[in-house]
C-alpha cells in the first residue's frame, strides 16, 4: 500500500496497460480517474465493469470521459477530477493507437491522425493538467513510451513508431521545463506485449490500399508473419500487468527518487542500453551548457 494517497488520471484506461494501471493504482490506495473516450456508448461496458470492480473492492476508482483528441474533453476531464477529488497529483499518459502497413501507403493525413492520438493527445492533457500541478508546486507525469524509440522495432509500423519517438522527445523537454515547478517525469518504456492489451488487435492501416498492395509481392509473407515473429521473442510468462506494476512502483516512490526512464521489456530487446547512453549524453550536454539543475533529480544515471 502506498504511503501517501495520490489523485491520478490515467488516459486510455478502457483496456490494456491503461485499465491495468488504473486498477493497480487504485488497489495501491490511490484515487484514480480512469480516462476513457465514448463512455456513454462504445466504452459503456468498460465503464460499468470498472465501477462494478470499484464497488466490490471498495476502491477510489471511477471513469472520466476523456478523449485525448479533444482539448475541450481534456479540460472538462481535469475539471471533473478536481471537482471529484479536490486535487490532482499525477497524470499517466497512456492513450495510444498503432497502425500497421508500408510507410509509403499512409497519406500525410493518416500520419497526422496517428500523431494526433499519440503525441497531440498528451499535449492536450498536459495543457489541461499543468496549470494545476504548477499551481501546487508538485506533481508527476508518467509517459508510456515504447522500446521502438530506442531501436527495438521491426518495419511496417512507421507512423506509430515515429509518433512514439515524437512523444518521447516531448517528454524529455517537458521534464526539464517542469522540474523547477516541482513536477517530475518518468518515462516507462514497454517492449512488445502481443497479448494482454488490444494494441495489435485494434491496429489500423493505411488509406492508400493500392500503394499497400505494391508491397505484397516482396513483403506479403513477412508482414503476415510479423506478429508471430514478435511473439517468439516474448517469454510465455510475460504479463501486461508488469507495466502497470512498474507504474505503481514509480508513483509510490518519494519525489526525487523516481527513475527518469524505466524499461519493462520481457523480450529483452536490448533497447535499454540505448536509453542509458542517451540519458548520459543528455546529462553531459546539460552540464556543458550549464543547465544541469534542469536534469530532474529523477535522472536514472
Ligand atoms: N502493447 C504493446 O506492445 C505496447 C508496447 C509499447 C508501448 N505501448 C503503448 O501502451 C499504451 C497503451 O496501449 P495498449 O498496449 O494497452 O493497447 P490498447 O489496449 O489498445 O489500449 C489503448 C488505449 O488507448 C485508448 N485510446 C485510443 N485513442 C484514444 C483517444 N482519442 N482518447 C482516449 N483514449 C484513446 C484506447 O481506447 P478505446 O478503447 O476507446 O480505443 C485504449 O484504451 C499506448 O500508448 C501504446 O503505444 C504498447
Image: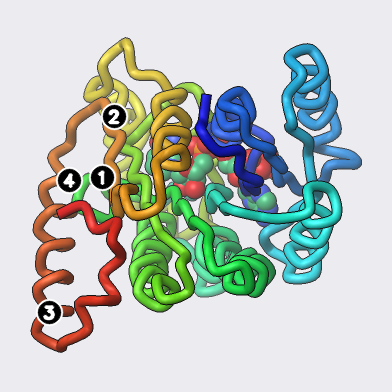
Question: How far is the residue under mark 4 from the one under mark 2?
Answer: 15 Å
Which element carries disc 3, helix, strand or loop? helix
Taking the image as drawn, is residue 214 in sight?
no
Q: Residues within 10 Å of mark 3 (few under 14, many from 20)?
A: some
Q: Nearer the viewer, residue 217 or 22?
A: 22
Residue at the location (65% across, 39% down)? 13
Extreme residue toward the right, this view: 40
* Quadrant location, ligand no. 1: top right
Extreme residue toward the bottom, this view: 289
Q: Earlier in the sequence, mark 3 or mark 4?
A: 4
Q: Nearer the viewer, mark 3 or mark 1?
A: 3
Residue at the location (44% across, 48% down)? 144
Q: Residues within 10 Å of mark 2 (few under 14, many from 20)?
A: some
Q: In the picture, residue 25 is in which quadrant?
A: top right
Question: How far is the residue under mark 3 from the one under mark 4?
Answer: 25 Å
Which element carries disc 2, helix, strand or loop? helix
Residue 274 image point, x, y percent: 13, 53
Q: Earlier in the sequence, mark 3 or mark 1?
A: 1
Q: Nearer the viewer, residue 244 or 180?
A: 180
Question: How far is the residue under mark 3 from the one under mark 1?
Answer: 35 Å
In the visual, does 70 lie left or right of 301? Answer: right
Label 4 beta carbon within 8 A of ligand 1: no
**Residue that badge 2 annotates:** 230
**Residue that badge 1 annotates:** 154
Residue 114 image point, x, y percent: 53, 61
Vertical placement of residue 234 versus 201, above or below = above
Q: Earlier in the sequence, mark 3 or mark 2?
A: 2
**Residue that badge 3 annotates:** 287
**Residue that badge 4 annotates:** 271
Placement of the C terminus among the 4 image quadrants = bottom left
Residue 267 image point, x, y percent: 23, 28
Vertical placement of residue 30 versus 85, above or below = above
Amino acid at each position: 500500500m502506498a504511503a501517501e494517497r495520490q489523485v491520478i488520471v490515467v488516459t486510455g484506461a478502457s483496456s490494456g496497460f491503461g485499465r491495468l494501471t488504473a486498477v493497480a493504482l487504485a488497489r495501491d490506495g490511490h484515487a484514480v480517474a480512469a480516462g476513457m473516450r465514448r463512455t456513454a456508448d462504445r466504452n459503456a461496458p468498460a465503464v460499468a465493469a470498472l465501477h462494478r470492480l470499484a464497488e466490490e473492492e471498495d476502491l477510489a476508482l471511477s471513469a472520466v470521459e476523456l478523449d485525448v483528441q479533444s482539448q475541450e474533453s481534456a479540460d472538462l476531464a481535469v475539471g471533473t477530477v478536481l471537482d471529484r477529488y479536490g486535487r490532482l497529483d499525477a497524470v499517466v499518459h497512456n492513450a495510444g493507437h498503432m497502425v500497421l502497413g508500408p510507410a509509403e501507403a499512409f497519406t500525410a493525413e493518416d500520419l497526422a491522425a496517428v500523431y494526433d492520438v499519440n503525441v497531440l493527445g498528451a499535449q492536450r492533457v498536459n495543457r489541461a493538467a499543468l496549470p494545476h500541478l504548477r499551481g501546487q508546486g508538485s506533481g508527476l507525469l508518467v509517459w508510456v513510451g515504447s522500446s521502438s524509440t530506442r531501436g527495438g522495432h521491426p518495419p511496417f509500423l512507421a507512423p506509430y513508431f515515429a509518433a512514439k519517438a515524437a512523444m518521447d522527445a516531448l517528454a524529455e523537454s517537458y521534464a526539464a521545463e517542469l522540474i523547477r515547478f516541482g513536477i517530475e517525469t518518468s518515462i516507462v518504456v514497454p517492449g512488445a506485449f502481443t497479448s494482454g492489451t488490444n494494441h495489435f488487435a485494434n491496429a489500423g492501416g493505411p488509406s492508400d490500399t493500392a500503394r499497400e498492395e505494391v508491397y505484397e509481392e516482396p513483403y506479403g509473407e513477412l508482414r503476415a508473419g510479423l506478429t508471430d515473429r514478435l511473439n517468439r521473442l516474448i517469454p510465455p510468462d510475460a504479463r501486461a500487468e508488469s507495466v502497470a506494476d512498474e507504474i505503481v512502483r514509480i508513483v509510490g516512490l518519494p519525489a526525487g527518487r523516481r527513475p527518469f526512464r524505466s524499461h519493462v521489456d520481457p523480450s529483452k530487446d536490448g533497447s535499454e542500453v540505448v536509453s542509458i547512453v542517451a540519458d548520459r549524453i543528455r546529462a553531459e550536454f546539460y552540464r556543458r551548457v550549464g543547465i544541469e539543475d534542469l536534469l530532474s533529480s529523477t535522472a536514472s544515471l
